[in-house]
Image: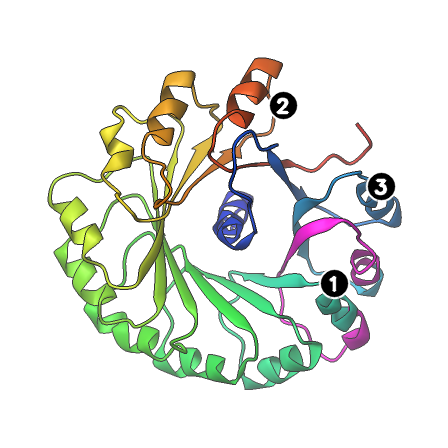
Amino acid sequence: MTLKLFKSSFILFLFFIQIRSAHSLPIQETYFYTGQVTADLISRWSSRSTPVNYILELGWPGQPELEQLSKLKFSNSLLTEVSYFPNEDFLASWQKLAENKATFVSLGIGLPNIRQIEILNKIGFEDYLFVLTAYPTEENAQNLSLLSGNITLSFFASRYPRYEEKDGLLAIPSNAKLHFTTDYWPWYSHMDVLNFLPHKKSLRVKGIFPSGQTLEYLHNIKNLKSITVETDFDAPYAKDWKQFKNLPVTWISKDHIPSERGLSAFEGSFSSTTQRKLILDLDWPLSPNEKERIESSPIPTNWIHQAPQFKY
């Protein structure tokens, strides 16, 4: 499981962050951090004058780290990734973290068993994100009906589910959200399987726009709530954005700052009846001209980058 995969999984959760919609908005920031969380670091982050979103890769946090995280102030949202499901150790510290409205994120460790779900329910997180590299079996998925909270499953299986995998997906509680990440758009067979599922669904596709029949299949997926397109380039044509029509769309601009023409094309698909968001996924600052161009756009924008370990 790579850091790149971890960071990518969290961009999904920017859909659930409240982003105001108006003209000339300041760019919202999301700090991404991997490493040990110290008291000094929490103090420096908490001293910011404006709140940000936090994405923290904790790995195997001990009690001191959990205690420090519960003291973090002025955060819009706090996503915490761990490499194990909590046991009875440090239960009170986990509960403090849950009270701080942190989202519990597991990466590459499958789904929790019944005993692990009992402990998670004691802790009391409101939101869960399970990042998986394979589709679950029916037995593993049905345990999630015992978990209290809002559940999202994000699949990095490099493909859409096959017909023989639908029973495992159908065993997932119908109020859970399903997110699929691939590098191609669904064809008829993929649409057919996805339409067996009653869940709210979202798709994220890297490096390509839909065309021809794939666009028709896309618009016929039931309960499709959002689309994410990740590119490191501007869309070739304005129609590439307009063809999504009223589907909510997020553009992840990866290691690329949209040009004036590219941003204008994206804005051309935005209206009072369409939802559009822009995510800048890059680890260098914007120039004054770039910042002015982005903030002058009516598109709500979030900039995700490595967290500063010291004050600016």
Going by the numbered disc 1, the residue's amino acid type is Asn
Query: Of tags 3 and 2, which is closer to the observer?
Result: 3
Q: Residue 234, relative to residue 175: is it above or below?
A: above
Please state which of residues 302 and 292 is positioned toward the viewer in this rendering.
292
Going by the numbered disc 3, the residue's amino acid type is Ser
Residue 237 is covered by the magenta coloring: no
According to the picture, the residue beneath numbered tag 2 turns out to be 285
Q: Which mark is residue 47?
A: 3
Going by the numbered disc 2, the residue's amino acid type is Pro
Spot occupied by residue 239 in the image (x, y as percentages of width and height): 23, 30
Spot occupied by residue 259 in the image (x, y as percentages of width and height): 42, 18
Q: Residue 262, relative to residue 224: is it above or below?
A: above
According to the picture, the residue beneath numbered tag 1 turns out to be 100
| Residue 250 appears left or right of 2 | left
Snapshot quadrant of residue 291: top right
Q: Which residues are magenta?
A: 65-93
